[in-house]
Image (spheres, grey):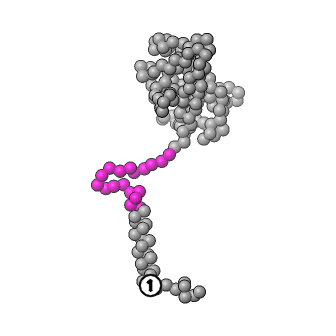
Amino acid sequence: MLRSLRTSPFRLLLLAGLLVCLSGFAHAQGAPRVNGPGIENAYAKPLVEVKIDVRALERPVVVPFCGVRFQNERFLCNAHIERREGGRWNPVRLRSNTDVLARIPRREWRAAVVPPGNLGTFTYTFNPEFFRVSKGDQLRIVVDYWHSKQAMATDDTDDKLFSPPFDCPY
């Protein structure tokens, strides 16, 4: 038993050299390249993605969206978040006074027409790190809508749809 614990200095030196080489190889895998472009950092951030089904009743509902992912997943571009505070709903504020949210110009909106009696599905995505929200806060999405494409393109008066409340997951 004692004999198996003994090892020659040559074996120890060989093992130490091998470990140094392997640790250098592992470090080199994540290191930026000196002679060309490379990725220096990669990190993930939590995003909240809310799916919203909009139902039109007697009249069409026109909802602005700004992009499509996959086949029919339309991203809302004229909506905002509210948080329940003491029984009242208030617009969510940004965490920092130096942050600014960009508003997508109306000329870049696309109109999604939801015909009477039908559903339209939309997605609203936000990063909770930018807003004064905490895990478990009751939130809702407020969506602007019109009854025609022409009204959406020219009219500043709109109506609002309110999502059912949901808990902030992050």
Q: Residues within 10 Å of mark 1 (few under 14, many from 20)?
A: few
Query: In the depicted view, which residue is nearer to us: 92 or 76?
Result: 76
Across and down, in percent, residue 148 comes to 51, 12
Q: Quadrant of the C terminus?
A: top right
Q: Which residues are magenta?
A: 27-44
Q: Residue at x 40, y 66 (%)?
A: 24
Task: Describe residue 169's horizontal placement relative to residue 152 as left or right.
Answer: right
Q: Is residue 118 visible?
A: yes
Please determine whether, in this image, residue 75 is positioned above or below residue 115: below
In magenta stretch: residue 43: yes
Identify the residue at horizontal 54%, vertical 25% (top origin).
Answer: 79
**Quadrant location of the N terminus in the rendered image:** bottom right
Residue 98 lies, with reference to residue 27, above or below; the image says above
- Left or right, 54 with respect to 43, comes to right
Residue 15 forms part of the magenta stretch: no
Q: Is residue 155 visible?
A: no
Q: In which quarter of the view is residue 2 placed? A: bottom right
Q: Give the amino acid type for the residue marked by disc 1 in the picture.
A: Pro
Majority SS type along the magenta span: loop
135 relative to 74 in the view: left or right: right
Q: Secondary structure at mark 1?
A: helix
* Front in this rendered view, residue 79 or 117: 117
Percent x, y for residue 142? 58, 24
Exactly how many numbered labels are in the figure? 1
The residue positioned 48% from the left and 14% from the top of the image is 149
Q: Residue extending furthest left? A: 35
Q: Residue furthest bottom?
A: 3
Q: Residue at x 38, y 57 (%)?
A: 31
Reading the image, the residue beneath label 1 is 9
Q: Compared to 75, does 152 lie above or below?
A: above
Q: Position of residue 75 (x, y in %)?
A: 50, 28
